Image (spheres, grey):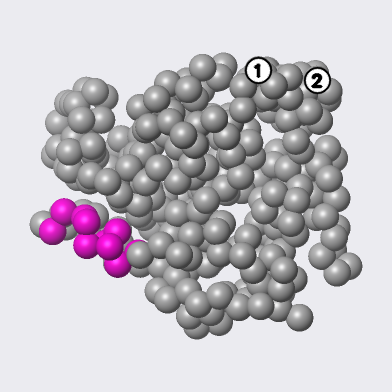
């Protein structure tokens, strides 16, 4: 049995494969399986409906896919004369931002630095399969992302076995801080955008790009605009004519130009730049 969600102008496949989350796996001809927190689920799209199995995962899927959002308001907020962004939106108008579990989002993006999408997926799936709690979905055994305490007890050396390299230390130290109760990621929910950025920067290995990914995909701060090499290239080539421009100037530009829904603009630009050229690299 399954339940369904109304999802107008939504592209499930593009959203789950757009470099936000790395653990969803194809299932059958039109479905994807994965865990959101400890809840295993199968998602399928037919027209403007998302079918969710099991039915009790329906509300979790709604929140994860941000289906309560007024997406038309997002599109209306974009600069009217921005032909570059309009091209990216037209390329995949059904793309959406996900709302991911906080720890999973932080840990995953800590592993993503200088990695390709395929490698990030391998790491995420191995961590889930070997250290995560088993979540059943019919005959399928899926893995939840391991909790901070599990990662902390596993140790940095064990994490390196999963291919994290030097990033293992960052993930392990973050897990130790959280498992000990020194900090709680939920504390960030009450902070304003700038204070949340500063909070995330206290974690080893987190720079502004990773912090903005977590602000956007974890905390749902839709003005957050991660600037990686893909986005920097798009901005320099398409908005500044290929001229020399400093990173600080780029940051000021995106805040002024894209506004309150800059994170959505970034995701459209990123997805278009990465996939329209047939390139499968990830955010470096």
The percent position of residue 66, horizontal first and vertical second, equals 48, 60
Label 1: which secondary element: loop
| Res. 234 in view | yes
* Tag nearer the camera, 1 or 2: 1
Q: Is residue 212 above or below residue 43?
A: above
Q: Is residue 109 above or below residue 76?
A: above
Sequence-wise, which precedes: disc 1 or disc 2?
2
Q: Is residue 58 above or below residue 35?
A: below
Q: Left or right of 50: which side holds 264?
A: left
Query: Is 194 covered by the magenta stretch?
Result: no
Q: Left or right of 2: which side holds 17?
A: left
- Circle 1 packing at 10 Å, graded few (<14), some (14-19), many (20+), is few
Residue depicted at 86% across the width and 69% down the height: 138
Residue depicted at 39% across the width and 25% down the height: 195
Q: Quadrant of residue 16?
A: bottom right
Q: Residue 220 versus residue 164: which sits nearer the camera?
A: 220
Q: Residue 231 versus residue 251: which sits nearer the camera?
A: 251
In the picture as drawn, the residue positioned furthest to the right comes out as 139
In the picture as drawn, the residue positioned furthest to the front comes out as 190
Q: Which residue is mark 1?
A: 182
Give the total number of marks visible in the rendering: 2
Q: Which residue is mark 2?
A: 155
Q: Quadrant of the image for the N terminus?
A: bottom right
Q: CA distance from mark 1 to mark 2?
A: 18 Å
Q: Are marks 1 and 2 in contact (CB under 8 Å)?
A: no
Residue depicted at 41% across the width and 62% down the height: 69
The percent position of residue 222, horizontal first and vertical second, equals 37, 46
| Res. 209 in view | no
Q: Is residue 246 above or below residue 269?
A: above
Dominant SS in magenta: helix
Q: Which residues are magenta?
A: 71-80
- Circle 2 packing at 10 Å, graded few (<14), some (14-19), many (20+), is some
């Amino acid at each position: 049995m399954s339940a369904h969600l109304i999802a107008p102008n939504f592209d499930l496949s593009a959203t789950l494969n757009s470099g936000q989350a790395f653990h969803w796996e194809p299932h059958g001809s039109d479905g994807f399986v994965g865990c959101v927190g400890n809840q295993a689920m199968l998602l399928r799209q037919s027209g403007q409906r998302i079918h969710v199995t099991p039915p009790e995962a329906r509300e979790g899927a709604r929140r994860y896919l941000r289906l309560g959002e007024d997406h038309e308001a997002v599109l209306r907020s974009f600069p009217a004369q921005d032909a570059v962004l309009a091209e990216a939106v037209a390329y995949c108008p059904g793309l959406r931002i996900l709302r991911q579990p906080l720890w999973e989002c932080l840990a995953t993006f800590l592993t993503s630095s200088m990695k390709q999408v395929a490698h990030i997926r391998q790491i995420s799936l191995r961590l889930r399969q070997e250290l995560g709690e088993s979540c059943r979905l019919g005959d399928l055994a899926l893995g939840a992302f391991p909790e901070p305490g599990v990662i902390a007890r596993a140790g940095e050396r064990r994490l390196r076995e999963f291919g994290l390299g030097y990033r293992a230390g960052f993930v392990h130290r973050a897990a130790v801080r959280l498992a000990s109760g020194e900090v709680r990621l939920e504390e960030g929910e009450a902070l304003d955008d700038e204070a949340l950025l500063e909070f995330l920067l206290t974690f080893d290995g987190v720079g502004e790009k990773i912090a903005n990914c977590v602000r956007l995909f974890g905390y749902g701060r839709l003005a957050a605009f991660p600037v990686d090499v893909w986005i920097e290239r798009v901005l320099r080539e398409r908005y500044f004519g290929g001229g020399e421009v400093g990173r600080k100037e780029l940051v000021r530009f995106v805040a002024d130009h894209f506004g309150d829904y800059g994170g959505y603009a970034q995701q459209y630009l990123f997805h278009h730049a990465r996939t329209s050229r047939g390139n499968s690299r990830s955010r470096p």
